Amino acid sequence: VNIDVEWGKAVNPQVVEDTLKDHPQAKAVFWQASETSTGVKHPNQELAQICQKYGVLSVVDGITAIGVFDVPMDAWGLDVVVSGSQKAFMLPPGLAFIALSEKAWARVEEAKCPRYYFDLRKELKSQSKADTAYTPAVSMIMGLRASLDIIKREGLENIFARHALLSKATREAMKALGLELLASESPSEAVTAVKVPPGVDGGAITKTLRDKYGVTIAGGQSQLKGKIFRISHMGYVSKADMLLVIGMVEVVLKELGYPLELGKGVSKAQEILFP
């Protein structure tokens, strides 16, 4: 059963609860902790509580959440959390991470569906012997070790605070330029999605930044293509990095005909980053 949500909005927990009431045969609820196509952060703790109330598994896509903001799996009672190496772990794509509750492991043991490479039972058996079920991406694992050293040195709480600060500064900078945020009500700390102002070619924003100034940000996807641009805060990103990106977004927007006062967004971000 799909629950359709307006792009740029977080899911309403009451809608999820009503859906579970209407479909008592449901066995699990799947959602993204942080949805980067729109820059939305969903109400993860509330959704976890609803899943517990109705006895269904909570399965969370944490790919752009783990290492960005706190997702206390045990404290919230989440059953399955998955993530990947290519976001806040600061690595190329190639590694996947999965954590399961005892309840979720019981469901894995009961499952009858065919499986081969993604047989979690075989993987657990191998990892209990300090091995992997199949050929591992050794170079990626060594890279992960280096990334985890960086994460450990900074400390998770500091990392969460940094992402929160960078995302807040970016949102306020964009608003200072007269731009509108797509996910204004429930923004994610992972990425900020900004609506392209009228009269400006959305594709030209990202292309000019990349080709002329060597700055890469993302555009919109699917129905939002050309309508938004997205600025990431994930991973190895500093205050200086964020100020550079904000400043170059200002420059490119002005080049493309958007009337703005250069430095206004940067100034607002500086107030937040360096109070």
Image: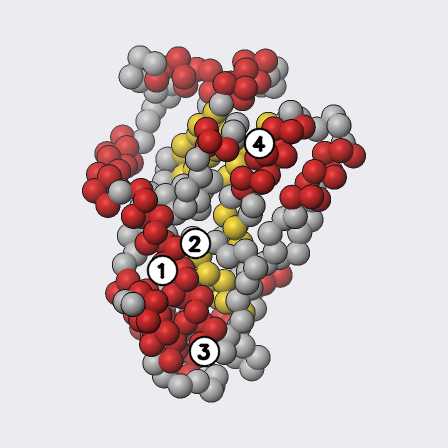
Is 102 drawn above or below residue 230 in the view shown?
A: above
Decide if residue 180 is on the left or right side of residue 247: right
> Residue 189 got which mark?
2
The residue indicated by pointer 1 is: 166
Does 107 appear above or below 32? above
Q: Quadrant of the C terminus?
A: bottom left
Residue 144: give x, y in percent of width and height: 28, 37
Give the image location of residue 40, x and y in percent: 53, 54
* Mark 2 vs mark 4, CA separation in Å: 22 Å
Toward the viewer: 134 or 14?
Answer: 14
Q: Are marks 4 and 1 in contact (CB under 8 Å)?
A: no
Give amino acid for label 1.
Leu
Secondary element type, mark 4: strand
Q: Is residue 111 visible?
A: yes
The part of the image, by quadrant, that contains residue 140 is: top left
Going from the N terminus, do you reach mark 3 or mark 1 first? 1
**Contact check, label 2 and label 1, Cβ < 8 Å:** yes
Residue 245: tell me if it is visible: no
Residue in the foreground of this view, choosing between 245 and 213: 245
Q: Tell me the distance, in whole angstroms, between the alpha carbons under discs 2 and 1.
A: 8 Å
**Disc marking residue 58:** 4
* Kind of residue at disc 2: Glu
Q: Are marks 3 and 1 in contact (CB under 8 Å)?
A: no
Q: Are marks 4 and 3 in contact (CB under 8 Å)?
A: no
**Which residue is rendered at x = 31% and y = 42% of the image?**
156
* Residue plotted at (57% across, 79% down): 198
Q: CA distance from mark 3 to mark 2?
A: 20 Å
Disc 3 element: loop
Q: Which mark is residue 177?
A: 3
Kindly identify which numbered label has been placed on residue 141: none
